[in-house]
Image: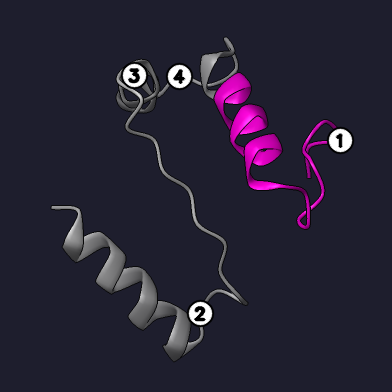
Amino acid sequence: MDPQAPPADAPAAQIHDALAAFIESDRFACVGAKNALARETVTHHHYAMLGTRAVLKCMSWRISTHL
């Protein structure tokens, strides 16, 4: 876990800012994410434990509605 990452219960704006800073950093090489950040199209969501059927259904729906 990144020691500079905000806690899981932090306000959404704080989490978005930390994510944006990480994407902009030299440690992160994904140009697709850098492009999405520059275009202000990055979204983030919080889910319960990954791997559960309910979370998978929610994630699948969110992905399908953004294609």
What amino acid type should be assigned to the residue bearing mark 1? Pro
Verify CB contact (< 8 Å) between mark 1 and mark 2: no
Question: As rendered, which of 33 and 38 lies closer to the eye?
Answer: 38
Q: Which residues are magenta?
A: 1-22
- According to the picture, the residue beneath numbered tag 1 turns out to be 3
Residue 24 among those drawn in magenta: no
Image coordinates for residue 40, horizontal then vertical, percent: 36, 25
What separation in Å lies between label 2 and label 3 (alpha carbons)? 27 Å
Q: Give the vertical position of 36 relative to 25 (above or below).
A: below
Verify CB contact (< 8 Å) between mark 3 and mark 4: yes
Q: Residues within 10 Å of mark 4 (few under 14, many from 20)?
A: few
Q: Earlier along the polypeptide chain: callout 3 or callout 1? A: 1
Q: Give the vertical position of 29 relative to 50 (above or below).
A: above
Q: Is residue 55 left or right of residue 57?
A: right
Q: Earlier along the polypeptide chain: callout 1 or callout 2? A: 1
The residue under the point 67% across, 30% down is 18
At mark 3, the secondary structure is helix
- According to the picture, the residue beneath numbered tag 2 turns out to be 51
Image coordinates for residue 52, horizontal then vertical, percent: 51, 86
What amino acid type should be assigned to the residue bearing mark 2? Gly
Q: Is residue 2 left or right of residue 12?
A: right
Verify CB contact (< 8 Å) between mark 3 and mark 1: no
At mark 2, the secondary structure is loop
- According to the picture, the residue beneath numbered tag 4 turns out to be 29
- According to the picture, the residue beneath numbered tag 3 turns out to be 31
